[in-house]
Amino acid sequence: MTDTIRSTCPYCGVGCGVLLTPQGNGALKVEGDPEHPANYGRLCSKGLALGDTVSLDGRLLAPKVDGKTAKWDDALQLVADKFKDTIAEHGPDSVAFYVSGQLLTEDYYVANKLMKGFIGSANIDTNSRLCMASTVAGHKRAFGTDTVPGTYEDLELADLVVLVGSNLAWCHPVLYQRLAAARAKRGTKVVVVDPRRTSTCDIADLHLKLAPGGDAALFNGLLAHLADQGEIDAEFVSQHVNGFDAALETARAEDLSLTGLTEADLATFYDMFTKTKKTVTVFSQGINQSSSGTEKVNSIINCHLATGRIGLPGSGPFSVTGQPNAMGGRETGGLANMLAAHLDLENAQHRDAVKSFWNAPEMPEAAGLKAVDMFDALAAGKIKALWVACTNPVISLPNANLVEEAIKNCPFTVVSDLSDQTDTARLADVVLPALGWGEKSGTVTNSDRTISRQRMALAHPGEARPDWEIFSEVGRRMGWEEAFDYRNEAQIFREHAALSKVAGDFGKDFDISALSDISDEDFDGFEPQKWPITAAREGGRFFADGKFFTPTGKANMLAVNARAPQAELDEEYPLRLNTGRQRDQWHTMTRTGRSSKLSKHLAEPFLQINPEDALACGLKDADLAVVKGRAGEAIFRVWITEDVAKGSPFVPIHWTCQTAAASTVSKIIPAIVDPFSGQPESKSAAVNITKFTADWYAFAISANAFETTSDYWAKVPAEGGWRAEMAGSGELDWQAYSQELFGTLKEPMVMVDQSTGLHRLAFFEDGKLSAALFVSPEPVAVAREYVIGLLGSDAINVLAARPGQDVKDPGPTVCSCMNVGRNQILDAIPVEGGATVDLIGELTGAGTNCGSCRAEVAQLIAQHSPRMAAE
Ligand SMILES: Nc1nc2c(c(=O)[nH]1)N[C@H]1C(S)=C(S)[C@@H](COP(=O)(O)OP(=O)(O)OC[C@H]3O[C@@H](n4cnc5c(=O)[nH]c(N)nc54)[C@H](O)[C@@H]3O)O[C@H]1N2
Ligand SMILES: Nc1nc2c(c(=O)[nH]1)N[C@H]1C(S)=C(S)[C@@H](COP(=O)(O)OP(=O)(O)OC[C@H]3O[C@@H](n4cnc5c(=O)[nH]c(N)nc54)[C@H](O)[C@@H]3O)O[C@H]1N2
Ligand code: SF4
Ligand SMILES: [Mo]
């Protein structure tokens, strides 16, 4: 294979098109697809590094049963038998599927059909419960269905873009770049609403450092202000909206102090919104992952409905989705409280229609268990057989210690994954090898309803199989041969499209019936298309005509109240922990964590903490800290910064037991959920923070992989090898320790700095540096990027741990694409002033490729630089 194949990036919901050119022997060249309407050729650092992540290291290549390699036939039969027996003995609700927004639409369709139509339970839920559930609930309450009204273009056409609980610069980088470009061209005003100062704030005209959970208060205040200023669209409201008066009355009674903002800030924002008709409000996890997430969503939509700013070019509420197929999962009904094709489980006519379409024996009448309830039921012994596909709940669900115990105690657990070593797969009775991105084939839907193809560019490794096929095989073995007699993705897609006609006939939004007869060839060549896709219309915006999907045809404004996060602070747990994402890592790092380029940016689990809190907790920069909540604890590297407010420290979610000793955030997060959506409040835990008292700290690099066993460690790939940070207690025999780490290497060169106690050990093989260890009683101060750069070279001066006069230490990486470090950027900033991101780009190359780091370059210029472990 040498031809270029068009596909879609497997990461965020922007859904960028990629051009994949296999290079032979498993390597892949990845470029942006200039014709894809999501990105027009752009890619972010993660998309650009996709080629680094497709190696087969650590891949599961054949099924495993009880830890031993098994034949597919035996493994599938075992799964089918166990599920059948469990259902026969305990009923259909004693089994459950827990799936993922990273499954393709075809996979999702089959899994949902199997559980809801044939097993006859609604116990299928997905990691989208942790992600989009509050938006789905809010959309359904307001619009009668789960519709995203606008398109990406709206961010470019708007005069004001309000980003609420969204770190767009890091989490939807290409959409952020589109917004930044539009702003540069036409002066779009940007407001960021986030308790934390993020890179996204670099294009903000106004950053509202809102108190956690204050969003509904902010938008209630806005609604009252809009009414006071006569900015209500009375005609739109009277003809197309229910519930205006009640919503306004509740809004007027709102306690705005919950926002934690000054009157002046509120006034500035309210004035901007009131005066700018073309406004898009983008929202993400700062809204959804909240015990009042659904209320927050409706408080935003209320303001757009009241002003008629919906469905128009450059106007509307806009939920940006996280995963590549979060939307596809919603379209196929992958949530426990949905049916399929945006039809409603609680509607008898809808149920009958789907039942007869599927020719299904069963159809549950009530919603199944939502993720947190599902794992509670597992812990209580009510779920006796569980199948997890394409997600890692031991890391991502709140109260992770309980989740882990529950899975351990479950009589029968199946995991479909690419690896049998994830924290969840390790606990399973059966692990089934799935095909991953680049190998599998099917469709995904991005945040603006564009359906795109993921295509196969790499050979199928070992015996791995596509998820839809695995679910179908089990369905057939459970006795439903005909219903699961699928031969390829196109056949499933046609059925999915045909089912959407049923939904269309009920007057629902999700209708792609024009694709019901798509041929295999046309499916192969399918070009990105926005739904709806019917004989009558294609794509476009919803609701400009004022027609909604409720029984009355009118939208609903909801009377909503703000609620502070529910995890209670007290003397023992006085701080409110916030959680979220890093720029260059994706979730549990199973893919991005393979790239040395991506691992350079923030190479350790960090704790952003305000200087006042740091002082109170006795912490210095680069110390290690134990963050302890009621449910559990974890360890992080301290990064003192004004970017987080006093009382609201922040940690990233990515680190697992594969990449760190004890940095799993979800162990700390309590399982508090939104009452409407069941979405966990993942952005809030009550914690205390103390210094992790280590007797020694170490930094190690090696050309070969090595095992780490200390109390604290974090390990990622580095160029030419691996790098790890470690710390522990007790006296360390550093020579024995180096043997333990690197195995039997030749005698190291050793240098001990008596004044600081820093021990430096360098190991050479054939005269080339193969490993080095730095041990110190204090956090290790070495020029990390510099010593990593020496791996494989004959440089003796590695023991200096700092570059000599002739070589510069690049410092921690800022620009992953062009490999530019912090020190290089700082050096390039002209002393006489006048630095711009473009100038630094010209001088160093930073920010000139994918642009993901431009916000950080700007921050550095403004002297706001992150400081990681002493560099
Ligand atoms: N690099 C990278 N990109 C990703 C992902 C990734 O893992 N890595 N994951 C993808 C997925 S699945 C998702 S869901 C998206 C998530 O994308 P985002 O939602 O943009 O990302 P987060 O970092 O989870 O959270 C966003 C912000 O919410 C803020 N926040 C916390 N509490 C509140 C609050 O009460 N109110 C408000 N207004 N803000 C609050 C946090 O400080 C944080 O900066 O990212 C997608 N893109
Ligand atoms: N505290 C806190 N917790 C959070 C969040 C937060 O902000 N804060 N965010 C939440 C959100 S929004 C999300 S989306 C979740 C994400 O959390 P998870 O879904 O648990 O994380 P991933 O690492 O994406 O897990 C995907 C798994 O699927 C495997 N995989 C990849 N491709 C395939 C495939 O094609 N088929 C199969 N069968 N397996 C595959 C990977 O190897 C990996 O093990 O985390 C949630 N948890
Ligand atoms: S913005 Fe980046 S991560 Fe998201 S789809 Fe595009 S290339 Fe992939
Ligand atoms: Mo997500």
Image: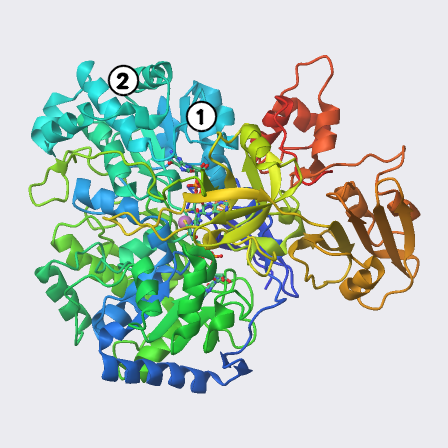
Q: Element at badge 1?
A: helix
In the rendered image, residue 36, in percent from the top left (x then y), is placed at 44, 44
Instruction: Name the side, left or right, on which 609 lies relative to 227.
Output: right
**Residue type, mark 1 in image:** Ala
In the rendered image, residue 246, in percent from the top left (x then y), is placed at 11, 30
| Label 2 sits on residue | 274
Which residue: 89% across, 33% down? 806
| Label 1 sits on residue | 182
In the rendered image, residue 306, in percent from the top left (x then y), is placed at 18, 26
Q: Element at badge 2?
A: helix
Tell me the number on the disc at residue 556.
none
Whole-angstrom CA distance, mark 2 to mark 1, is: 21 Å
Counting residues from the N terminus, which is met first, the one under dot 2 or under dot 1?
Answer: 1
**Label 2: how many residues lie within 10 Å, few (<14), some (14-19) or many (20+)?**
many
Q: Is residue 194 above or below residue 770?
A: above
In the rendered image, residue 620, in percent from the top left (x then y), is placed at 65, 35
Q: Is residue 33 above or below residue 278?
A: below
**Labels in figure, total:** 2
Q: Which mark lies nearer to you, 2 or 1? A: 2
Which residue: 57% across, 58% down? 3
- Which quadrant would the C terminus be assigned to in this image? top right
**Residue type, mark 2 in image:** Thr
Q: Is residue 860 above or below residue 689?
A: above
